[in-house]
Amino acid sequence: MKSIAAWFASAGVAAAAIGTLAGVAPIYAIAVAAAVLFVPTLFRPKLLVLAALLMVYAAREVPRATGVEVFGYLDELAVVLVATLLPLHRLAGGERLRRYPGLLPFSAFVAIGLLSAHLNGVAASLAVQGAFLVVKGVLFGYALAQVDWRPSDLAIFAKGGLVVVVVSLVTALINMVLPAHWYALMTNGLLQPDYRGPVASLIGPLPHPGDFGIVMSLLSIGLFAWAKEVRSSPLIWFGVAVTSVAALLSFRRKSILGIVAAVSTLQTRVSRGAAISLLGLAGPLLLFALWGTVSDVISYTRLEYSDPTAAARIVLTVDSWQVAVQHFPFGAGFSRFGTALARDHYSPEYVKLGYESIWGLGNTPDSNHFLTDTSWPALLGEAGVFGAIAFVLGLASIFRSVRGFHTSASPGLQRWLGLTALGWFVQFIVESAAAPVFSAAPTNVLLFGIVGVLVGLDADRMPDARDVVRCSSGSNVRGYGAGASAFVDKRKLWH
């Protein structure tokens, strides 16, 4: 504990120096941050994971708060650090690298996307950046799979999640009471309160209602899984209800639908009969209690999608098929469709499709807000039909591995994490229809990162990661042997 406290004290001093440098030259501040973060990896790689997660969060908040756009690259820096240093740390200990579920199809997706870029004359630097942008979540998960996670770590995850729940709900309450002031504080005046009827969309401690909606959905899923696998109590169910309502009050349709789909999936997995009873009894009651809010969301959706040619994500989805057909069997190449790079270096494909005259898809900062509005058009448009199929196969491999882990894991915290990961997967699949969850922070590192933790917990039981964990002496290592007693002891702290 003393070493951890000393590291955090040093990190505080470093943060002050980094903050000072940020006012002079932001790029130097980022370089110093990278040097500081290297130190804990020599002895405590899990601290690097924590620091990387904080950097991913900062990549969303700091640019808005300071106006210094270069800090938006902190999440890329975090991924590079963990993807480089954690595998090296494992190799330095004389151990083989673990495989990650779906690594082969994800690699095929990258290869197809790069080949598509080459065939369409995309600059190599842009193509490589585009590939990294799409798979940085997979790289983050792969890095976390190289860490020897223990069952005792899961109790720390749970406590950390509880802190996030409390902070999110407190800030959401302040947001609800003082919407204009809170929006001004959290978005640096860049975003005005988004009202649905008399209620402003909640943002809590985050810069956008969409971010808050998905975070509250994930927290609600985690609490639901806790009630099913660890301990059920009125307080836990109250937490599930409050976080679900908070997600609803973000007024993000994808988050609302996602949490319904995820919870239904989890309930069906643990008890199919109870799931039917729960939906039949609680569904109508919740619909009646929240009908005003739900009707506002329905009305807004009908208005937005009444003209299919006006909704940006519909335009992108339809046109991605056209682009894929034109470049069949490949795609337009990385950085050419549906991604941030295609927006920043306005893609020739957009010019051909006449996007410059479509509001939200234009070629200026004021008119290009919706060019990264969803996930699947980018996958299909840039890597083509075969590339998109490869990515889907990678996701299917992750789903199979997560489901297998939950089935075979020891009861309690390990099954809780497996069930949570399964619910998160469903949530992210629903979110992907209206948000770039596979490539944008923080969703990409959460989705692929939790899978990496599962691999690190027990690689031998993961379907895509067998027979790859060995000690330097050459004997096989299994996570549920000596770890079982530690798991039981840790569980006592939670009852």
Image (spheres, rainbow, N blue to C red):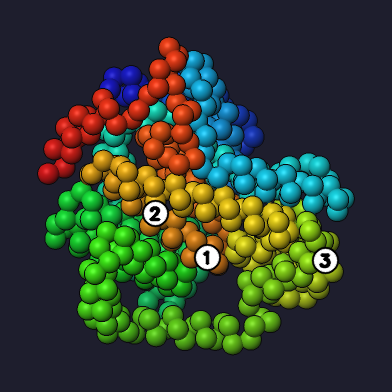
Estimate how packed mark 3 is, as few (under 14), some (14 to 19) or many (20 or more) residues with alpha carbons within 10 Å.
Answer: some
* Residues at circles 1 and 3 in contact by the CB criterion of under 8 Å: no
Residue at the location (65% across, 42% down)?
107
448 is higher (above) or lower (below) than 350: above
**Residue in the foreground of this view, choosing between 47 and 276:** 276
Q: Nearer the viewer, mark 1 or mark 3?
A: 3
Residue drawn at point x = 68 percent, y = 82 percent: 309
In three-dimensional space, the C-alpha distance between marks 1 and 3, rounded to whole angstroms, equals 38 Å
Mark 2 → mark 3, Cα distance in angstroms? 36 Å
Q: Secondary structure at mark 1?
A: loop
* Residue type, label 3: Gln
The crowding category of the residue bearing disc 1, from other C-alpha atoms within 10 Å (few below 14, some 14 to 19, many at least 20), is: some
First reached walking from the N terminus: tag 1 or tag 2: 1
Kindly identify which numbered label has been placed on residue 191: 1
Q: Can residue 11 be seen here?
A: no
Query: What residue sits right under mark 2 in the picture?
Result: 422
Residue 214, horizontal then vertical, whole percent: 43, 60
User: Is the residue under label 2 in contact with that under label 1 (CB below 8 Å)?
Assistant: no
Label 3: which secondary element: helix
